[in-house]
Image: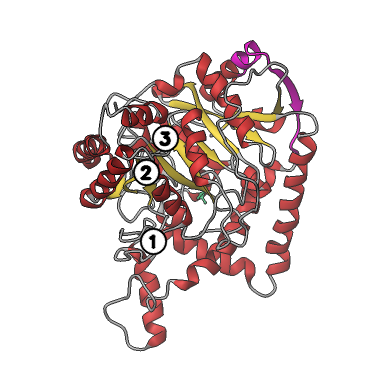
Amino acid sequence: MIHSSLSQLGAALRAKKISSVELTQTYLDRIAQLNPTLNAFITVNPEMSLAQARAADARLAAGSAAALTGIPIAQKDIFCAKGWLTTCGSKMLHNFVSPYDAHVISQFNNAGAINLGKTNMDEFAMGSSNETSHYGAVKNPWDTARVPGGSSGGTAAAVAARLCAAATGTDTGGSIRQPAALCGISGLKPTYGVCSRYGMIAFASSLDQAGPMGRSAEDLALMMNVMAGFDERDSTSLQREKEDYTRDLNKPLTGLRIGLPKEFFAEGMGSDVAKAVEAALAEYKKLGAVIVDISLPNSKLSVPVYYVLAPAEASSNLSRFDGVRYGYRAPEYSDLADMYEKSRAQGFGAEVKRRIMIGTYVLSHGYYDAYYLQAQKIRRLIAQDFTEAFTQCDVIMGPTSPSTAFKLGEKGDDPVQMYLSDIYTIAVNLAGLPGMSIPCGFGANDMPVGLQIIGNYFDEARMLNVAHQFQQATDWHSRAPKI
Ligand code: GLN
């Protein structure tokens, strides 16, 4: 059962071969057995999950089940879920039980999916290795001495180790795609505005986007059918007609134009990653695709631009954590200012403080024009590069990450090295485009390699088609770690 796809699980539930309570209990038992090693979950609440499972079983019995009714889905701990501890990986929110549901959570609840628990993540989604979590690092199930990637590292490890059927992530600069790549699973960051950010704890609001992480493109499509859609409570949510993201899965790829940005295939990419990506491209040619050389000349500026804009937005978003309204408050202080200072000094970890300081600096008088405004202009140029590229190709492909999963602690002292993990993913967020990662082989130390697929705005259904056809012809996505 734990290796079944979402549609197989849905069929088994509807045919009464298994009940949702049994399925949920199977995953809860696996979590109890493996989470002490992997640390993929911050919170599990069997009582709440099983109550949902009983309700799902009633719905299944009544014949009113939807595609995901009764299926256990884990939620990144960035999503507020009513009655659930919601920490965002931070001491700052160590005692925050959300009084309401994020839009994405209520969509899953309405679909009858089971909330299996809240997954570990880098603190406030800032990180590429899941080592900044207040709740400790997550271990990569392929090799527990290595990182799972970040910031959605708990989700990626949980999906890879079959601790849940699928799970959610969020991606501000690569946090769905990079951990998906490092854990050998599939992940999709939709076009900005497709999934509501309501109730998703904000990091950098102009970049943050929720998306599905699962074992196959087909599973991601079913998740997207639940997650996507207009929500008036998010002012950047887009009013578009409801889509069926599975509609194009089986289309042939004949004539598909794949753009290869020369900047992605230059120095920096590990030779093991290059080998796996090239083999994947050869497979795509067999499936009828043609390769087009393209250029994204400004993409080399995406990391520095991101590390001006994302901290600027974060410094503003995180000002709400002041020890007054909710979250951590220092136990001892002398006056109001001292309470703010101590609460924030004790509640935030080092990486979050670093971002708040950078953000405050680039927004301050005298530096705003030199850094923030300049970065905004380059962001526009980066987006224009993609618009130009998509006149020559249908999708863009390349590596998701320059290397496979690195060792825990390996990059801890060097933030710039850590930031470079997202060198291929960040431009996509700056442009607001959809991007995904699918497993395409194994590299150094037998660790998984991810292939990145970037689409034009709102082209998720085509990207899922492109990924699904590859997964019909190969079996990288169905390999599981031996844990
Ligand atoms: N790794 C990047 C960062 O640290 C991206 C994180 C994300 O997408 N949330 O900011």
Mark 1 vs 3: CB contact within 8 A: no
Of residues 273 and 258, which is closer to you in this image?
Answer: 258
Residue 482 placement: quadrant: top left
How many numbered badges does the structure rendering display?
A: 3
In the drawing, does residue 155 fall left or right of residue 374? left
Q: Alpha-carbon neighbours of circle 1 within 10 Å: few (<14), some, or many (≥20)?
A: some
Q: Is residue 247 above or below residue 196?
A: above
Residue sitting at 42 percent across and 55 percent down? 79
Q: Spatial distance from mark 2 to mark 3, Cα to Cα?
A: 34 Å
Instruction: Tell me which amino acid carries mark 3.
Output: Phe
**How many residues crowd around disc 2 within 10 Å: few (fewer than 14), some, or many (20 or more)?**
many
Residue 46 lies, in percent from the top left, at 22, 48
Q: Secondary structure at mark 1?
A: loop
Quick one: label 1 or label 3, which is nearer the N terminus? 1
**Label 1 sits on residue:** 349
Q: Which residues are magenta?
A: 281-297
Task: Residue at the far bottom: name it.
Answer: 335
Point out which mark residue 113 bears: 2
Q: Depth check: 61 or 430 in front? A: 61
Quarter the N terminus occupies? top left
Mark 2 or mark 3: which comes first in sequence?
Answer: 2
**The residue tagged with tag 3: helix, strand or loop?**
loop
Q: Earlier in the sequence, mark 1 or mark 2?
A: 2
Whether residue 300 is visible, yes or no, is yes
Q: Which residue is mark 3?
A: 406
On whether residue 291 falls in the magenta region, the answer is yes
